[in-house]
Image (spheres, grey):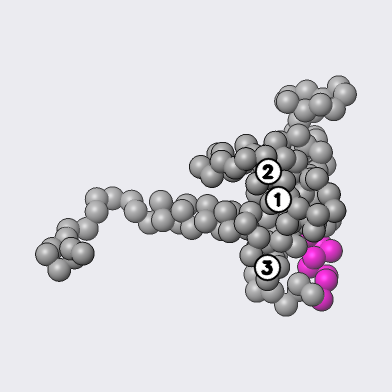
Amino acid sequence: MSSKKGAQGGKAFGILKAKQEEQLEELNKEFLNDPKYNLDEDLEEKLEIFKKKFMEFDLNDHGDIDMMSLKRMLEKLGVPKTHLELKKMIGEVTGGVAEVISYRDFVRMMLGKRSAILKIILMYEEKAKEKEERLAGPPPKKGFADLP
């Protein structure tokens, strides 16, 4: 899965993920200390969620989300996109500077005021999970007043 020399599954993969988590935690501390973001409510909790999401989508373990990782992620969410659309999304997040999404860009997008397409999709996924959790058990009985 990984193109790194000598990388393998099991223990080596666990060490690699632990290092990556450590690096992302350092970046989270930068955001916590940044006056631009530290007024945000529940910032620490949000950063922890973003870190887990980013690690889940960083399929090549290079510390960034490339086009193929983004493509697989969106397909997994049920929102497949063309390569052109993916390039546009990455350009929107990175400001057209890079061809991959770094963790720093990812967090800025998620905390920023601009509504990037990727941000909307990820927020939609969270809302869908909340709905799935609430719909446990049989549906409530409906009467004539409930009809459209």
Farthest left residue in view: 144
Percent coordinates x, y for residue 129 in the rendering: 47, 52
**Residue found 65% across the figure and 46% down from its top:** 85
> Mark 2 and mark 3: span between their CA atoms?
21 Å
Residue 145 in view here: yes
Q: Which badge, 1 or 3, comes first in the chain's sequence?
A: 1
Q: Amino acid at mark 3?
A: Arg
Q: Which residue is mark 3?
A: 114
Of badges 1 and 3, nearer the viewer stands: 1
> Mark 1 and mark 2: span between their CA atoms?
6 Å
Q: Is residue 137 above or below residue 16?
A: below
Q: Which residue is mark 1?
A: 88
Residue 34 falls left or right of residue 85: right
**Residue found 77% across the figure and 37% down from its top:** 61
Q: Which residue is mark 2?
A: 84
Percent coordinates x, y for residue 40 in the rendering: 69, 74
Percent coordinates x, y for residue 72 in the rendering: 62, 37
Region rendered in magenta: 28-35
Q: Which badge, 2 or 3, comes first in the chain's sequence?
A: 2
